[in-house]
Amino acid sequence: MGARKHNTAEQNKEAKKTLYFAKLNDCPSSPRKMRLVAELIRGKNVELALSILQHTPNYAAEKLFKLLKSAIANWQQKNEGVRMEDSHLFVKEVMVDEGRMLKRVQPAPQGRAHRVRKRSNHVTVIIDSRVQQEETKVVTK
């Protein structure tokens, strides 16, 4: 590996130490349906987002609820001894990308066949602390 590539990899590694996220790959629901639920929690406080997802009846909401809890657990792993309530966690980003598509065939009249596309998606949830952002704003000024 070249020196520039090595340095870039080291910088990315350092940046990920302060990034708290969770990923869900190949979730068996369409990205369109997942994005509808993701819009509900984007930018909200973590406690509010969890309660919204808990009371949303969609299948996608269950998956996103578990994913958000996983992101919170990742935050707690990196910040031992810090209370979640004091750090004012919020959902910084929710990215829903298209995943693998299973192509199936549905029989149709007169010997024809219609294609059925079973879609899946990849979801990434990034959470951040409002306290950290305020501290960095004060330092930069």
Image (tube, rainbow, N blue to C red):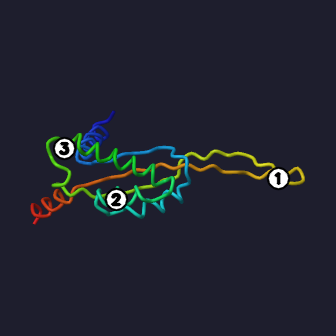
Where is residue 105? Give x, y as percent: 75, 46
Where is residue 87? Give x, y as percent: 18, 55
**Distance from the alpha carbon under mark 2 to that under mark 3:** 21 Å
Task: Say whether residue 109 is left or right of residue 22.
Answer: right
Q: Which residue is label 3 attached to?
A: 79
Where is residue 47? Give x, y as percent: 29, 57
* Mark toward the start of the polypeptide (1 vs 3): 3
- Local SS, label 2: helix
Q: Nearer the viewer, residue 94 or 47?
A: 47
Look at discs 2 and 1 and give the one toward the viewer.
Answer: 2
* Mark toward the start of the polypeptide (2 vs 3): 2
Q: Which mark is residue 49?
A: 2
* Mark toward the start of the polypeptide (2 vs 1): 2
Residue occupying the far right of the picture: 110
**10 Å crowding of disc 3: few (<14), some (14-19), many (20+):** few
Q: Which mark is residue 31?
A: none
Task: Say whether residue 70 is left or right of residue 60.
Answer: left
Where is residue 62? Give x, y as percent: 45, 50
Q: Nearer the viewer, residue 139 or 4?
A: 139
If the image is split into quadrants, where does the C terminus sit? bottom left
- Local SS, label 3: loop
Please say if 44 is above or below 119.
below
**Distance from the alpha carbon under mark 2 to that under mark 1:** 43 Å
Q: Which residue is label 1 attached to?
A: 108
